[in-house]
Image: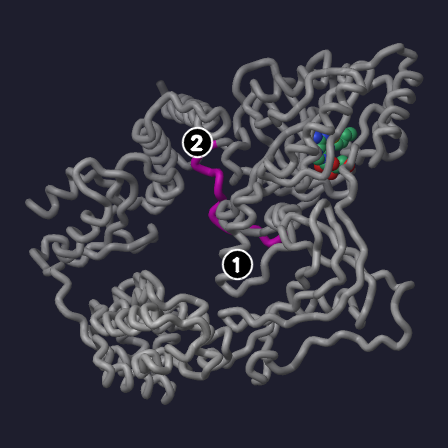
Amino acid sequence: MSVKEKIEALTKSINEHNHRYYVLNEPVISDQDFDLLLKELESLEALHPELVLSYSPTKRVGEVPIDKFNSFPHTYPLYSLGNTYSEGELLEFDQRVKKTLGKESVLYTAELKFDGAAVSLSYRNGQLERALTRGDGVQGDDITANIKTIPTVPLQLQGEGWPEFFEIRGEVFAARADFDSVNEQRRANNEAPFANPRNFASGSLKLLDSREVAKRKLSIVFYGIASAKPVAESHYESLKLAAQWGFITSSNTMKPGTILEVLDFIKKIEESRESLGFDIDGAVIKVDKLADQQEAGFTAKIPRWAIAYKYPAQTAFTRIAGITYQVGRTGAVTPVANLEPVLLAGTTVKRASLYNEDEVLRLDLHELDTVSIEKGGEIIPKITGVVQEKRIANAPKLTFPSNCPECSQPLFRKEGEAITYCLNQDHCPPQLLGKLEHYVGRKAMDIESLGRETLDLLIKAELVRDVADLYDLQIEQILQLDRMAPKSATNLVQGIEASRQQPFHRLLFALGIRMVGETVAKKLVKHFKSMDELATASIEALTAVDEVGEKIAEQVVQWFSKEEHRQLIERLRKSGLQLVEESTGNEIISNALNGKKFVVSGVFIRYEREQLKALIEQHGGVVLSGISSKTDYLIAGDNMGPSKLEKAQKLQVPIISEDDFERMIHG
Ligand code: IVH
């Protein structure tokens, strides 16, 4: 076999295994065997870059961002759909269709109407040629690089019988769980969350860097084929064929049936809508026979053979009673509208999120305005508009405060950012509460007897203004708090007392210095050994520590540069806390690994992952959490994530087994 043939065969085989793994959930080879194939292909491709195929599985994620999207015409235009909200109109649609076709009975398929971004993919000779956004229906943007990052999108088709050229339409969307975790992450990074899964999906497709798109968990489902000649007799069969060719189609598709069966289907879906795991905004009903579709044809904009049934809009109208500005633990100020209670999709709603200052400005809210509220992808409903006609004359405009509603300090908004912050991190009550909760947390000082409510009471009674105050608390003071029993007060004091013995690295993490998480705290302590050494460390000294970059170093230096923080440390010292790291029992055994950097991933036979990491450090190696060009070795166990593997291979990081590793440390 020539190299060219070998590359072709490997590409085909890996694409097939990917399809089995991602689409069918039925792999037929082990992850290791799969990795071997991938490795083989990669090394051949590295030696013969001119032979790399456009549909190579190693090229799902691009290496460089593009500067702009090129626009291309759709070979077959994308139509939109007529809408209805009523069953009566669906029956009328059925009558119209029958009349147009001159038939007594017509069968329909019914599908979910996915709420995401429409895309059209073209395939030539069984290979993905291009992916376009819907655009204006006539032409769209070339988003091929982004679409390829979705692992279920076939680069090369399975089975046989596809037309030489066709376009397939589908919807890119985000599952609710994936969407929620992305937003959680964004909030943690002080980035504005996405308003709903639809915006998230379409926004992601418009990113210029496919490496970023690859990080976003997007899903895709296909629901229609456009080709010169029909691929089957019926739409339902065409979807079955699409599935055989490797496309993900929806399992919630109704077998061809009458319009009455369609009504049943719609009802069932509406009942199970919440448990689908992703958003839909209705159902799409299509004439099943493709010849009938062709005969019915299109009006200027929409097909006569299909219609969207939308579930009753989850919208209600009510009046704004006021806005509360909530200050979170990070100091972010979020406006929340208090509403006159109103029923919306079965629940009484009293509050709606307003997200940020821009949203308040965009809506141009005035006192006592009547607003429309909607249930979107998120649980808290949102205000979607103001009913201008109902505005009360001379009602004052609602403005964002310039001072913190909790501590009266001036608020601050960085240019180009959506979120407004109170910068009084140490003393603004909700921020202080957040800090204290973090301090007593299980992974920090682990003071179990001190819960959120008690902390809140202690702050309100002005008994605690910072973490050092905890150690000056007297039992008599605690007993004065609301509903505090002597037993809990004693527990509390004992808990605080015991926390003095927590090791230094826990204390450092507990202080809540920005960007100093558990791992960074441990690394810093390992290097600097004492609070005093750390407090005087320069940026250069700090960045010399593994996994500590410029940004973290700056946060550390900034924190210790505050006089108030230095005094806090002195008070903690006086209270007997551990400001020096005691030996951890993790003593160095050898220097066999000589500073080499390791990433550990997967499940091992002889070791727990944590044990392996300890061994690396005991033999003078360094453990990294993610693969980068600095990684010297990846120790791979069973079931490790394919993305880690791919990255290691791309960066040519040697991949070793636990046996290889043992040989390294034992010679
Ligand atoms: S078929 C000619 N099927 O709804 C028929 N569309 O207004 C064209 N959509 O943006 C569309 N789920 O992206 C069809 N199962 C489904 C769909 C669906 C969602 C979207 C589509 C388009 C809009 C049509």
Local packing at callout 1 (Cα closer than 10 Å; few below 14, some 14-19, many 20+) is some
Any magenta on residue 59?
Answer: yes
State which region is magenta. Answer: 56-68
Q: Is residue 151 left or right of residue 416?
A: left
Secondary element type, mark 2: helix
Instruction: Check disc 2 and report the residue beneath it.
Output: 51
Nearest the viewer among 503 and 418 is 503
Disc number lying in front (1 or 2): 1
Local packing at callout 2 (Cα closer than 10 Å; few below 14, some 14-19, many 20+) is some
Q: Amino acid at mark 2?
A: Leu
Question: Mark on residue 186?
Answer: 1
Alpha carbon of mark 1 to alpha carbon of mark 2: how far?
41 Å
Give the residue at x 44% y 28%: 21
Q: Is residue 576 left or right of residue 157?
A: left
Earlier in the chain: of badge 1 and badge 2, it is 2
At which x and y percent is residue 128? Answer: 58, 30
Residue 142 visible within the image: yes
Q: Amino acid at mark 1?
A: Arg
Any magenta on residue 215?
Answer: no
At which x and y percent is residue 392? Answer: 88, 71
Give the residue at x 50% y 77%: 429
* Quarter of the image with the C terminus in it: top left
At which x and y percent is residue 277? Answer: 58, 38
* Quarter of the image with the N terminus in it: top left
Give the residue at x 36% y 89%: 563
Secondary element type, mark 1: helix
Q: Is residue 98 left or right of residue 539?
A: right
Nearest the viewer among 212 and 320 is 320
**Which quadrant of the figure shows ligand 1?**
top right
